[in-house]
Amino acid sequence: MTGGPLTDRPFRSFWMGGYEGADHVNGRGDALDMVRATGHDRLLARDYREVRRLGLRCVRESVGWRLSERAPGAWDFSRARCMARTARREGLQVLWTLMHYGVPPDLTLLDDALIPRFARFAAAAAAAIRPLCPGPRFYTPINEISFLAWAASSSDAMGPAGAPREVGAREDSRISGYEIKRRLVRAALAGMDAIREVDPQARFLHIDPVIHVVPTEDTPDQRALAEQVASYQWQAFDMLAGRQDPELGGHPAALDWIGLNHYHSSQWEVPSEKRLAWHLGDPRRQPLSALLGQVWQRYGRPLLVAETGHIGRGRADWLHDIAGEAQRALRAGVPLGGVCLYPMLDRPDWYEPARWHRSGLWHVPRDARGAAAGRRLVRPYARALADWERGRRSAMALDLVADHGSPAGSHA
């Protein structure tokens, strides 16, 4: 198994759209189905037509292990097949996430039996998807290994593996979730091998947050703590690549494309856990282009901003910021293949389903029962995307001229 060349451009568009697909059981025992909660399952064709009209040709979707596995060895991929067929009709490329936090009810993230079970599921999912999707087919075996391991270890937010969540409890980023991380890496590697058996041309996109951490006070102990917490972001990638804990089976070629998620809250101080406010211009923040450069220097693999977005009235300004940083990264030689805006559709909170985040490119009107009943485009956000889409097309045209000479009929 080898990673793709650094020069390949496997995605149909630079700008992409991500749909919320989490399917875990939260700490209150609520089994989440975020595709259904946003109405994306019922309004799929409309959603795909709308993103295509905005110039996006590539979307991220989730198969969902918990939702798909009816019993050990018995799967229902009807939703994924519907997504694949609809995307093909609309000319969209789908990047598939297989496990979006949720596991079957007889497993937990503390159970080694998860590894072979996930491999069988991954093979079955790839076998269902492959005939319906033209290549290149990209799979994310497990979404956000590092984030999931931390969340499951620090609280019960991802189900019963973690400690009970106390109301109002402060997050603690000093917890890395190392043992769960190791198990998830083993599962991801086993899943990759199983997928390759049924789809030899499969490509892989491993995704985790890219973060920046600073000390609350400039003391030796707090500086060391900040460096330690920041280093946790590399653990899953290092394990996959065989740099750390090589007994897990990692190897350099396991890193094909690296996806990086980044939000306004992805930079903070320790031990206070206070966020470095983007909207206030906290001078301790690092620009995204610098963070992307660090990942490129560390791994030498092509990158994708796999999730980014903001809330409320800041969405358009955030997009302008991220787009500018993407341009700077590209000019610095970072092989950045695209930026995925997330979520396309506004979404309810995992813990408080009546509270919607107002973060999507489309708001989701609800009926009297609270069910998703339509779509409403957030126009300032859409205009910002259109501005950068036009700029990107112009830049690509200039690149073609530079590469191949002036087009026929043009005069310098």
Image (cartoon, rainbow, N blue to C red):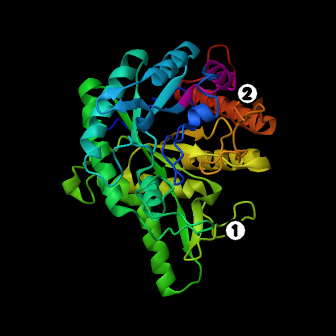
CA gap, disc 2 to disc 1? Answer: 39 Å
Q: Where residue 157 sits: x, y (%)? A: 51, 55
Q: Main secondary structure of the magenta part?
A: helix
Nearer the observer, 282 or 268? 268
Answer with the quarter of the image where residue 36 lies: top right
Q: Position of residue 111 (x, y in %)?
A: 29, 52
Outermost residue toward the left in this view:
247
Is 57 magenta? The answer is yes
Residue at disc 1, secondary structure: loop
Check the image and report above or below for 142 versus 286. above
The residue that label 2 is drawn on is: 373
Please state the horizontal and vertical placement of residue 139, each as a whole percent of the image.
40, 34
Image point (53%, 26%), residue name:
12
Location of residue 48 in the rendering, given as x and y in whole percent from the top left corner: 62, 22
Residue 16 can be seen, yes or no: no
Q: Can see residue 348?
A: yes
What amino acid is at disc 2? Ala
In the drawing, what numbered circle is on residue 239?
Answer: none
Residue depicted at x 73% and y 44%: 358
In the picture, residue 407 is in which quadrant? top right
Examine the image and state in which quarter residue 265 appears: bottom right
Q: Is residue 137 left or right of residue 164?
A: left
Where is the C terminus found, in terms of image quarters? top right
User: Label 1 amino acid?
Assistant: Asp
Determine which residue is flagged by label 1: 282
Label 2 Cα neighbours within 10 Å, binned few <14 / some 14-19 / many ≥20: some
SS type, badge 2: loop
Q: Residue at x 55, y 58 (%)?
A: 290
Q: Which residues are magenta?
A: 45-59
- Lower sequence index among marks 2 and 1: 1
